[in-house]
Image (spheres, rainbow, N blue to C red):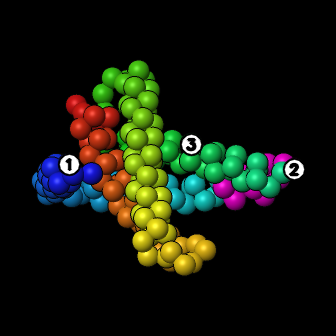
Amino acid sequence: MNIASLKFRERTINLFLSRFLQVLKGEYRRFLKFSIVGGSGIVVNLAVVWLGNELIFSALKDSLKTSLSYFLGIIISIFTNFVLNDIWTWSDKRQGGIQGFFLRMGKYYVVSAVAGVIQFLISNGLATLSRIYFFKDELQVPVLWKLIFALAGIAVGIMINFFMNHFWTFKK
């Protein structure tokens, strides 16, 4: 990676952050609602993961029931987050009746997938880099660092999610 490439990335990140802060300045209440909905999504996700492991998929092999529970938790929490954001966070931008609802929902799932992949890449990338440069002699990265890296990925994911949903999914 050369200097020009690094400077381009730095400019791109700075441009994104400054634009995000501009939007947030005028939309802080909407961002607060979005964050509250996201918190409820965490509760829904964890409840579904628990139900999946303990009840729905309990007869399956542990690794399979866990994977299916994670998948179901993600799908259901994205749906509940979409419905709450549609009704509450961006209620002033709803249009198009039932067809508009399904179009927004499809866009919301696309945005969630993009943000999720970026969140994963950041969290996993930081863990990999720390393993290479800071924890060479250790067998694994300490769990506290993994949580910090997850939070870094989540922070970027939240910004991307809000920005894309604000300007694409719920664009009036």
Q: In the image, what residue type sits under mark 1?
A: Ser
Q: In the image, what residue type sits under mark 3?
A: Ile
Q: Nearer the viewer, mark 2 or mark 1?
A: 1
Residue under the point 70% across and 46% down: 68
The residue where tag 2 is placed is: 59
Q: In the rendered structure, which segment of residues is drawn in magenta? A: 49-60
| Residue nearest the viewer, comparing 75 with 11 | 11
Of the 4 image quadrants, the one containing the C terminus is top left
| Residue nearest the viewer, comparing 154 with 120 | 120
Give the CA distance from mark 2 to mark 1: 51 Å
The residue where tag 3 is placed is: 75
> Could you tell me which secondary element the residue under label 1 belongs to?
helix
Residue under the point 21% across and 51% down: 2
Residue 33 visible, this orientation:
no
Instruction: Answer with mark 3 or mark 1, whichever residue precedes in sequence.
Output: 1
Q: In the image, what residue type sits under mark 2?
A: Ala
Q: Main secondary structure of the magenta part?
A: helix
The residue where tag 1 is placed is: 5
